[in-house]
Amino acid sequence: MKAKRSFLEHFKFVFVMCLATLIVMLAIGRRTWAGPMLIVMFGSLALYFMSHSFLKSFAFTVWVFAFVSASMVYPGAFMTWLGVDLKILIVPLIQIIMFGMGTTLSVADFGRVFKMPWPVLVGFVLQFSVMPLTGLVLARAFGFEAEIAAGVVLIGSCPGGVASNLMTYLAGGNVALSVTMTSCSTLVSPLMTPFLMDKLAGQFIEIEFLKMMFGIINMIIVPIVAGLIANRILYSRHKAFSQGRVLALIGVASILLAAGVGLFAPAAVFTYGDASLQKDGFVVGLSLIGVVALAKLVIGVWLKGPEHWMDKALPIVSMTGICYIIAIITARSRDDLMTVGVYLIAAAIIHNFVGYILGYWFARAARLDESSCRTVAFEVGMQNGGMASGLAMNVLKSAPAALAPAIFGPWMNVSGSVMATWWHRKLAGHPDAKGKSSAKRQ
């Protein structure tokens, strides 16, 4: 590990060289190679950040800049490959990310709402009131065109993202409450997000409630449920899940079932009116359950490898998936981004800031303890950008609507990291604040 960090540290010199070269190229008017140099510059900076104990929390955002630069310079590389439109990758990538979220959860995380109903209720009300209404106000104030305005409301209408759990942990907040709030807000999102979009964004574009609801179930809920099953396979103390024959049976059966559904089941597993629940979420979920079971068989049983290997692999997979989703969206909205990019960044900063401030102080007004107030601030201020991007592209069929989530998401990670670091120096002293994880391994 130290050797790897030592190697990555050298990329700071690559970054400095690229930055100097870029400045010289722009100064003398040689812009041809400025684009590729910008990509290498951000890539080398991200690799250096990954070697630094403090800066590594910002590495994801720098990787986003690298991918955005690549999509702006070479948009065709993120449009089609061999005649296949790459936007078809967005939903499967989000499903994989949501599956990863599910593997960090357990049934206890949902049941914990009965142990702390008041903080969860406070966070729930703020999550689905402050952020969508703020999004609507900003969309009107900045005068965004209809589809972009709908995207701003959309990111505010989505539930909290998993990044809020990490930020809560770093800030000394109530991690158990954070995971429970994220789980519960995600669970009700098939109803709340379409409802809010219909009432608030319906003035900008047409919103079809049922189509969006089924889209969320397919893209978010089904993969998370599959992840919960994988969590049981990975972390259960039951002897059966440590036996090679059982793992092989689960793995092979899941993959064969996924193949059967993919090949022989109708495209829509359930239809109501013009809306339908597609089968791809079930195919992806079953496939990933099989992959996890077989991976545990190889790594855990045969090779006697580390027990929590999944915890190290999933962040890399999620980071790569989100970066590529943002690049695909950026490539399709390049011209719009050149026009309104600065205004969207300003809207993202204001939206996020309002979420943190109102989340924290309304929680204080509700007489929550300090660690819970910090938790609510993160849960209200940070949304599931991947979900918003997927809904914009797959349900609203609008690349401009996906611009806001593509910009808001990276900014939330930057601001969240900064605020978590500041709060970490003033630990709240809550018994859960220093816990490593609230996702109980069962």
Image (spheres, rainbow, N blue to C red):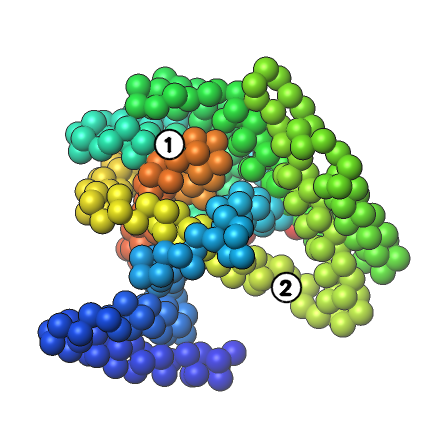
Give the residue at the far front of this rendering.
83
Q: Is residue 152 visible?
A: no
Q: Is residue 43 visible?
A: yes
Task: Say left or right for 13 vs 106.
Answer: left
Task: Say left or right for 351 vs 97.
Answer: left
Disc 2 secondary structure class? helix
What residue is shown at x 52% (from left), y 52% (from top)? 83
Q: Which residue is mark 2?
A: 309
N-terminal of the two: label 1 or label 2? 1
The Cα–Cα distance between marks 1 and 2, rounded to whole angstroms, is 34 Å
Q: Amino acid at mark 1?
A: Leu
Q: Position of residue 370 (x, y in %)?
A: 35, 41
Q: Amino acid at mark 2?
A: Trp
Asked whether 350 or 402 is in front, the reply is 402
| Vertical side of 179 occupied by 313: above or below | below
**10 Å crowding of disc 1: few (<14), some (14-19), many (20+):** many
What residue is shown at x 22% (from left), y 33% (from top)? 144
Task: Say left or right for 120 vs 262.
Answer: left
What residue is shown at x 53% (from left), y 20% (from top)? 210
| Vertical side of 244 occupied by 102: above or below | above
**10 Å crowding of disc 2: few (<14), some (14-19), many (20+):** some
Q: Which residue is mark 1?
A: 154
Q: Position of residue 16 (x, y in %)?
A: 25, 79
Q: Which mark's residue is nearer the viewer, 1 or 2?
A: 1
